[in-house]
Amino acid sequence: MSQPSMTIRPEGDKIRIEFDRDALPEGRLGGYLSLMNSIFLAELSTMTDEQADQLAEDIKADWWGREGQAIMDMLGVKDG
């Protein structure tokens, strides 16, 4: 794999981002694009820090409600 190289340039009303294909680890392009999209969407958000914290807590509680018992069983933790 060569030294990573990325070029960013304006092109009309768009911005073109180019990566050297041989510089990206195999199978990682999707992950990089997903991260860039998440950052882009976060920048557009009007959510306050408090709202974001509450959303994170709600997601964590929902996940634990679905997965918690399976994890406790996997760890051998008994109720009570």
Image (cartoon, grey):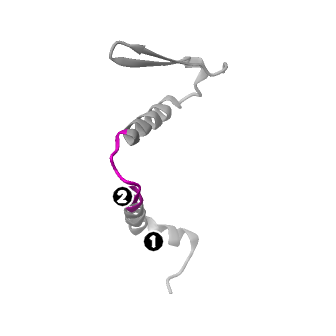
What is the x, y in percent for residue 61?
40, 66
Q: Residues within 10 Å of mark 1 (few under 14, many from 20)?
A: some
Q: Mark 2 packing: few (<14 Cα in 10 Å), some, or many (20+)?
A: few
Amino acid identity at mark 1: Gln
- 4 lies left or right of 56: right
Between the residue at mark 1 and the residue at mark 2, the CA separation in whole angstroms equals: 28 Å
Residue at the disc numbered 2: 51
Q: Residue at coordinates 34% horizontally, 51% vertically from top-left? A: 47
Residue toward you, 65 or 45: 45
Q: Which residue is mark 1?
A: 69
Q: Which of the marked residues, 1 or 2, is nearer the chain's N terminus?
A: 2
Front-most of 48 and 30? 48
Q: Is residue 8 above or below residue 59?
A: above
- Residue 33 rendering spot, x and y as whole percentages: 45, 31
Residue 58 placement (x, y as % from top left): 37, 63
Q: Amino acid at mark 2?
A: Gln
Quadrant location, the N terminus: top right
Q: Main secondary structure of the magenta part?
A: helix
Which one is closest to the eye, mark 1 or mark 2? 2
Task: Give yes or no for residue 49 being in the magenta stretch.
Answer: yes
For label 1, the SS is helix
What's the magenta region? 44-55
**Residue 57 drawn in magenta:** no
Q: Nearer the viewer, residue 23 or 42?
A: 42
